Image: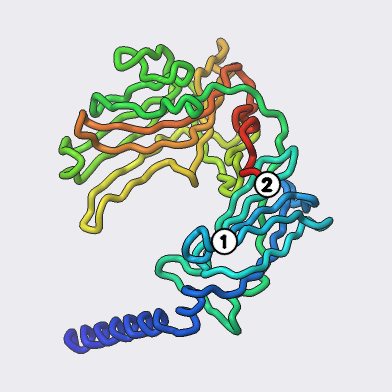
Amino acid sequence: MKRYCAAVLISLSALQVVALVTLKKDPVYRDARRNGAQTKIELHIQDDDGTPVPDAKIKAYLGMNFRPLGTWIKGTTDTNGVFVLEGKTCGDEIEVFVAKDGYYGSHVIYRYAKMGEERDVKDGKWQPYGAAEKIGLRKIKNPIRLVSNVESMAYDFSITVTNVAVGFDMMKNDWVAPHGAGDTSDFYLEFRSDGLPPNASRFAQLIMTYSEPFGAVYEVPVATQSNFKGCYTVDGDKFGTRPFLFENRMTESGRQIDRLGENRLFVVRSRCKVDEHGRLVSANYATLDYLSFSTSFKGPGGCRLCYHFNPTPNDMNLEAEETARRPQNFSF
């Protein structure tokens, strides 16, 4: 019975391989990848409330294997916030930029030929042909000056101790003394590992906990298409107090990294003060935009940490002036 089951599994695997090879050798698909096929995408540009944005500028690149061979297309959305993108592409890169005064720019990449995934081509057209795609265009509302290490690019930090929760001071962009020049802990990071160098390490963890009392964090949905990816203001009802655990493990298939990157963003509450009844009366707020870590040859480990911190107590505005001040897209 075991031999029969094994034979069936082997046969199924062989069929899957044959099907994949056949698909890759499909002459219609292969010709579209080499010489291009027609695409048509109906772009619907909407603001935060889902309202169509008319007169938004569109700049799109239709790739043809090598960037110089591609085509740039420019235009504006109609009164319904729609722009129809049409042209020829080999399918691996359709890059769209959207901009309008008073809005944060947006950037989206579509692909008909992702690695390990192949799409249909019919009558010389990529499928689905004429599909509708939504792109969000977020309004610039009330940006203010926040403390951040993003502009200075001072966001790489050495981890010098293990199994110790070390405070991090966002105002001073450093570990709290005696590990750095900081004096107030907005949160704590504790690094654990097997003590081996990066090329031999099989285990490492970074644990984030929070200053007391009322120190807390919650995760924010990320606006991946927009230049402004976070939230405008704090939602005080969403804070949780559980620690966040990030792991970095070496497995047979290679290193797996759990990190707070482009698709994860957190709001942090810190520097909390309470009254005589133990009630929260004051706090500062920040967005933790990026956090990654690894073992290091120079010491136990290292981490990259990017954030925007509001230095005004009880001000829940997290819309950074520096983000609004940057060019919102490539020149049109």
Task: Residue 306: give x, y in percent of width and height.
Answer: 46, 31
Q: Residues within 10 Å of mark 1 (few under 14, many from 20)?
A: many
**In the foreground, 235 or 228:** 228
The amino acid type found where label 2 is placed reads Phe
Q: Quadrant of residue 305?
A: top left
Report which residue position mark 2 lands on. 332
Camera-side mark, 2 or 1: 2
* Residue on which the image places disc 1: 94
Mark found first going from the N terminus, 2 or 1: 1
The answer to which of 33 and 71 lies nearer the viewer is: 71
**108 versus 19 height, above or below:** above
**Label 1 near label 2: C-beta < 8 Å?**
no
Give the residue drawn at x 36%, y 39%. 245
Q: Is residue 312 above or below residue 117?
A: above
Image quarter hosting the N terminus: bottom left
Residue at (52%, 40%) from the top-left corner?
Answer: 219
Q: Nearer the viewer, residue 265 or 152?
A: 152
Give the mark count: 2
- Residue 275 locus on image (x, y percent): 57, 12
Q: Residue at 55% of width from left, 57% of height from top?
A: 109
Q: Mark 1 is on which residue type?
A: Ile
Q: Position of residue 271 (x, y in %)?
A: 50, 18
